[in-house]
Image (tube, rainbow, N blue to C red):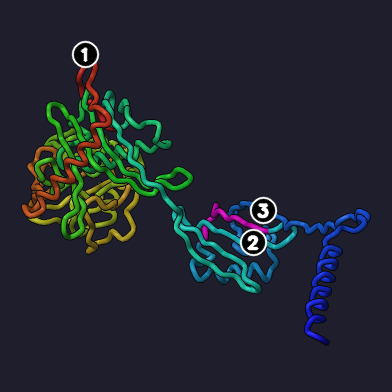
Amino acid sequence: MDRGAVPLALAGLIAGGILLAVAFFVPGPEAPDEPVPVVVVPAPLPPVSGYDTLGSGETLGELLVANGLGPASAYAVTEVVRGFKSPRSLRPGLIARFTAVSGSEPDRIVLQLSPDSLLDLVAADTTWNGAVHEVPVSIDTVVLAGLIESSLWFAELSGDVEKLGEDEFSEYVFDLADVFAWKVDFTRDIRRGDAFRAAIERERRPDGSIRSRRFLAIELRNRNRDLQAIPFQRPDGRREYFDVEGEALKGVFLRYPVPFRITSGFSRRRYHPVLKRNRAHLGIDYGAPHGTPVKATAAGTVVRAGTWGSFGRIVEIRHVKNFSTRYAHLSSIARGVTAGAFVQQGQIIGRVGSTGLATGPHLHYEFLQAGTHRNPATLELPSAERLEDEHVDAFRVERDQALALLDAVPLPVPSSDSTAGPAVAE
């Protein structure tokens, strides 16, 4: 091939390629429309949850089978539960949630072991796995104020009243009485027209119930005096209440073992309603309902716990500095309160009753010093220690922050036409 033929051949190839490309991109006759095949994949059924409770006399295994588990699965779940809590200890009313796809065995079970813990059980192949989770809580603060008309229990409330659950305020009354128990005798000192306000921090469960609560600040107007209570944690971990100057509110002795009215005071000569004659009444009677918890007024060692003549069921406690106290006519004595046992101040040692020589349920309380009966209502009782100087500055910071919370609600003032008078905490 000569040199001139090469360009001609190359030109031919190029022209042919162009024609081929044009032919490739030119559309041909339209193909008839054909339906596009549609493949339908059914969606999996969503899981469904249901609730049940453990009945009286029902075992955990029976509850599981009744909610769709086969005997083998029920046994496997029971064994997993046993690793966290004895199935025999589960009480009637226990709430269980079962989750399953329709027509299948449940593959997830949640047991509410307590108000604050859930046992989550999940199926994994041929076995089950379990884990305990804490019930989540939310934290809030409520500020309340109350004007006392007939008693502390029935105060006219203001502030965050709508946030309170049923009977929640009555629990705060007992707590408040405990805080000021060393300064105020709520059976004798509270008067109509007295008032209080308090800031309270709460831990609330999803169902609205309260897991814990604590006062952040309290102010109490009693007669012509204003008392404040600010909590502060000592270096050893004790959380105690102090006034605005850092003086401890806590005393060595509580003023009373039950916050109820006095029905009979200390007397060297009193007519006995059962014996029908005069004799000394060397204690104080509190007219509390049957079953009311009785608290030890101070820490000490139990020297008597049982039945003792006309006292009926009685607990006697020996305290520091030759002091001792007696709690008589009890309906029952708390577990562990036996001779030789040590009890803490405020610990429940028994419950009000009418055992022994008694006409009805009440608590007979005696206070002795070096074996001699004394009147606890008039006796000057020793106080606890003041806050240490090195912690005063830190306390003042917390005090100012806490008292500022109370500004959210004013301290109630009685109307001009109200009449001041005694109010009994019944």
Who's the residue at 22% across and 40% down the image?
A: 217
Between the residue at mark 1 and the residue at mark 3, the CA separation in whole angstroms equals: 62 Å
Between the residue at mark 1 and the residue at mark 2, the CA separation in whole angstroms equals: 65 Å
On screen, residue 21 versus residue 79, left or right, reads right
On screen, residue 322 versus residue 36, left or right, reads left
Against 148, residue 327 (above or below) is: below
Q: Quadrant of the N terminus?
A: bottom right
Looking at the rendered structure, the kind of residue marked 1 is Ser
Looking at the rendered structure, the kind of residue marked 3 is Val
Using a 10 Å C-alpha cutoff, classify the residue at mark 1 as few (fewer than 14 neighbours), some (14 to 19) or many (20 or more). Answer: few
Q: Secondary structure at mark 3?
A: strand
Mark carried by residue 48? 3
Looking at the rendered structure, the kind of residue marked 2 is Leu
Mark carried by residue 416? 1
Residue beneath disc 2: 64
In the rendered image, residue 211 lying in the magenta stretch gets the answer no
Estimate the x, y position of residue 300 in percent, counting from the top left: 18, 57
Against 381, residue 29 (above or below) is: below
Q: In this picture, which residue range is highlighted in magenta?
A: 90-100
